Amino acid sequence: MQLVVNVLGGFLIVVCVVSALGDFARVPALVETMHRLGISAKMLPVLGLIKMAGAIGVGIGFAQSLFAIAMGVCLSAYFACAVIAHTRVKDPLRESAAAYVILVVALTYLLTSLAV
């Protein structure tokens, strides 16, 4: 089970870091998506910091299981908010699929972390 936690954790670290770098760089497609979701482009650095903190926390979670559980809760909440934001504006699945997939991965990471 620990192997599953580690693989999911590694995936979440990569996704959070890549996504945060996009936030910091203010990638035009990302800025457009945020505008459509009703989120100010000024919030992108804050969202990037949240994702970077999540990635660091998951990394610490490799050594501290309580940290892994805490990060599972935090990242699940973050991506649940992302899913809600996409659903609220009735985004098509192709625009919101990543948020749904990452939410499922974060929830799976949380549940497997609880089981270890």
Image (tube, rainbow, N blue to C red):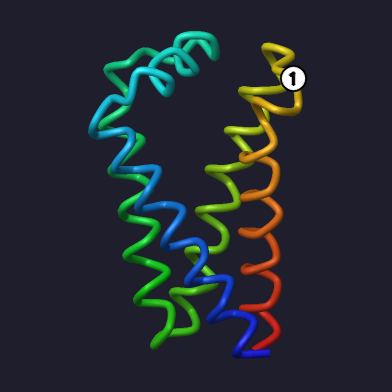
The location of residue 87, given as percent across then percent down, is 72, 22
> Is 43 drawn above or below residue 106 in the view shown?
above
Q: Secondary structure under badge 1?
A: loop
The amino acid type, in three-letter code, at marker 1 is Pro
Residue in view at x 61 percent, y 59 percent: 106
The location of residue 27, given as percent across then percent down, is 32, 25
Q: Which quadrant holds the N terminus?
A: bottom right
Q: Nearer the viewer, residue 47 or 65?
A: 47
The location of residue 59, given as percent across then percent down, is 37, 74
Q: Which quadrant holds the C terminus?
A: bottom right
Residue in view at x 39 percent, y 57 percent: 54
Would you identify the image quadrant in which residue 88 lies? top right
Q: Nearer the viewer, residue 93 or 109?
A: 93
> Is residue 29 left or right of 77 when viewed as pictured?
left
Residue in view at x 65 percent, y 59 percent: 105
Residue at the spot of label 1: 92
> Is residue 38 left or right of 86 when viewed as pictured?
left
The location of residue 99, given as percent across then percent down, is 62, 39
Residue in view at x 63 percent, y 69 percent: 109
Tag 1: Cα neighbours inside 10 Å, few (<14), some, or many (≥20)? few
